[in-house]
C-alpha cells in the first residue's frame, strides 16, 4: 500500500505569490475560504507508513515539514528525519530550492536524471548538502529504481523544457529552446510499492500529451498531473505576465488540446491536478472552471491532501 500526502499543490510562487495581487492571490490572503493558500509543488509518499520519500523539494519544504507531523523527527535521537529520500522531476526553482533547507548533515538519498544532477553540480550552493550524508543517485529513463523503504519509481520522459534560469544560456549556445522536447530535463514518474499493488503517476510538468504518454496512462489508478494553467494565455489576459503556459512547458487544462480533453478517453480511475498556478481560476471554490473540471472527474489538489492506494 502507498500513502501519499500533497505537501504543496501550488506551482512556482505558490498561492498567494509574494508580489501578486491578482484575484486568486488577494482572496487567498483574505482568508475567506474562497481560495485556500497553497505552498509550492511537492508530494510525499510512504510504503511502510513511517519512512517518507519526498518528490520535488520546494522552497516551502520547511513549512511543509512543520505542517505535516509525519515528517517530524521521531526516533528519540537528537537528530532524525522520516525523510529518507528526495526525487526530482526537473531542475525548476520550485522543485530544487528546498534542497538548501535540508542541509545540516542529515543523511538522505537524492535521485534525479543525470541532466538534473548536472544542474545541481554546477551550482556550488548545493554543496551545503554534505556529500558524506547526502548521496546523489542518478536515475535512468525506463529503469525501475528503489528509492528506499519499499518505494519504487520508474522514470519516463515527458515533453518539457530546461529550467527557466538556464534558458538564457541555452539560447546563447543553441539559438533555440526546444520547448516540448522529450529530454531528461523533465520526467514523469510511475511510483509503486515493492510489495506490489496499485501504482500512481506523478507528472507535475508536461507540455503536451503524446501518444506514448496516453498509452502509458491508460487505465491507471491514480494520476497527479500538471495543473499549471486553465487557459494557455491566462497570465497575459489577467495582466500578470507575458508568458503563455506552452512557453513555460505546461499544457492547459481546458481546450481541445488541453489535459481534460486528452484524459477523457484514458479511463484513469482518479485524476488530480497538482502544480496549480495562482493565475488559474480553478483555485476559486465554486468558479465555473472548478465546476467544469469536477464534472470532468478531476480533483484539485490542496496542501495536506491525503490519498491511499
Ligand atoms: C515552471 O513550472 O514552469 C517553473 O517552476 C517556472 C519557474 O521556474 O518560475
Ligand atoms: Mn514549476
Ligand atoms: Zn496571483
Image (cartoon, rainbow, N blue to C red):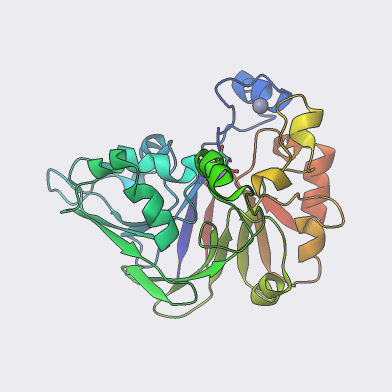
Residue 70 shows in the view: no
> In this image, 53 relative to 297: left or right?
left
In the image, farthest residue toward the right: 256
Q: Quadrant of residue 20?
A: top right
Q: Reply above or below: 14 against 217.
A: above
> In this image, 267 relative to 90: left or right?
right
Q: Quadrant of residue 11?
A: top right
- Ligand 3 is found in the corner quadrant, namely top right
Q: Position of residue 275 (x, y in %)?
A: 60, 46
- At horizontal 55% and vertical 42% (from top left) the residue drawn is 172
Q: Reply above or below: 293 against 51.
A: above
- At horizontal 60% and vertical 21% (from top left) the residue drawn is 29
In the image, farthest residue toward the bottom: 196
> In this image, 257 relative to 270: left or right?
right
Q: Quadrant of the N terminus?
A: bottom left
Q: Position of residue 269 (x, y in %)?
A: 68, 69
Q: Reply above or below: 219 against 66.
A: below
Q: Quadrant of residue 286?
A: top right
Q: Position of residue 2 (x, y in %)?
A: 45, 67
> In this image, 225 relative to 292: left or right?
left
Q: Position of residue 30 (x, y in %)?
A: 63, 19
- At horizontal 78% and vertical 43% (from top left) the residue drawn is 232
Q: Nearer the viewer, residue 299 or 33?
A: 299
**Numbered-mark total:** 0
Residue 283 shows in the view: yes
- At horizontal 43% and vertical 71% (from top left) the residue drawn is 140
Q: Reply above or below: 212 against 73.
A: below
Amino acid at each position: 500500500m502507498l500513502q501519499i500526502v500533497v505537501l504543496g499543490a501550488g506551482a512556482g510562487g505558490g498561492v498567494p505569490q509574494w508580489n501578486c495581487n491578482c484575484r486568486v492571490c488577494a482572496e487567498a490572503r483574505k482568508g475567506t475560504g474562497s481560495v485556500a493558500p497553497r505552498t509550492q509543488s511537492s508530494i510525499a509518499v510512504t510504503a511502510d507508513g513511517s519512512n517518507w520519500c519526498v518528490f520535488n523539494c520546494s522552497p516551502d519544504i520547511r513549512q511543509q515539514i512543520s505542517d505535516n507531523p509525519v515528517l517530524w523527527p521521531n526516533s528519540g535521537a537528537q537528530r532524525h528525519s522520516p525523510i529518507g529520500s528526495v526525487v526530482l522531476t526537473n531542475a525548476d526553482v520550485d522543485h530544487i530550492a528546498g534542497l538548501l533547507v535540508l542541509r545540516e548533515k542529515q543523511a538522505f538519498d537524492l535521485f534525479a536524471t543525470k541532466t538534473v544532477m548536472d544542474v545541481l553540480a554546477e551550482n556550488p550552493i548545493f554543496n551545503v548538502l554534505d556529500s558524506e550524508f547526502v548521496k546523489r543517485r542518478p536515475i535512468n529513463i525506463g529503469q525501475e529504481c528503489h528509492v528506499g523503504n519499499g518505494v519504487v519509481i520508474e522514470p519516463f520522459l515527458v515533453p518539457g523544457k530546461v529550467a527557466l534560469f538556464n534558458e538564457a544560456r541555452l539560447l546563447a549556445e543553441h539559438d533555440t529552446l526546444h520547448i516540448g522536447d522529450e529530454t531528461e530535463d523533465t520526467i514523469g514518474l510511475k511510483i509503486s510499492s515493492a510489495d506490489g499493488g496499485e501504482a500512481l503517476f506523478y507528472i507535475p510538468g508536461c507540455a503536451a500529451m503524446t501518444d506514448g504518454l496516453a498509452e502509458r496512462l491508460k487505465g491507471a489508478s491514480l494520476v497527479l498531473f500538471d495543473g499549471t494553467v486553465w487557459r494557455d494565455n491566462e497570465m497575459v489576459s489577467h495582466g500578470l505576465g507575458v508568458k503563455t503556459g506552452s512557453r513555460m512547458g505546461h499544457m492547459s487544462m481546458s481546450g481541445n488540446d488541453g489535459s481534460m480533453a486528452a484524459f477523457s478517453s484514458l479511463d484513469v480511475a482518479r485524476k488530480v491536478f497538482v502544480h496549480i498556478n495562482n493565475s488559474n481560476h480553478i483555485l476559486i471554490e465554486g468558479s465555473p472552471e472548478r465546476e467544469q473540471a469536477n464534472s470532468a472527474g478531476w480533483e484539485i489538489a490542496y496542501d495536506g491532501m491525503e490519498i491511499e492506494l
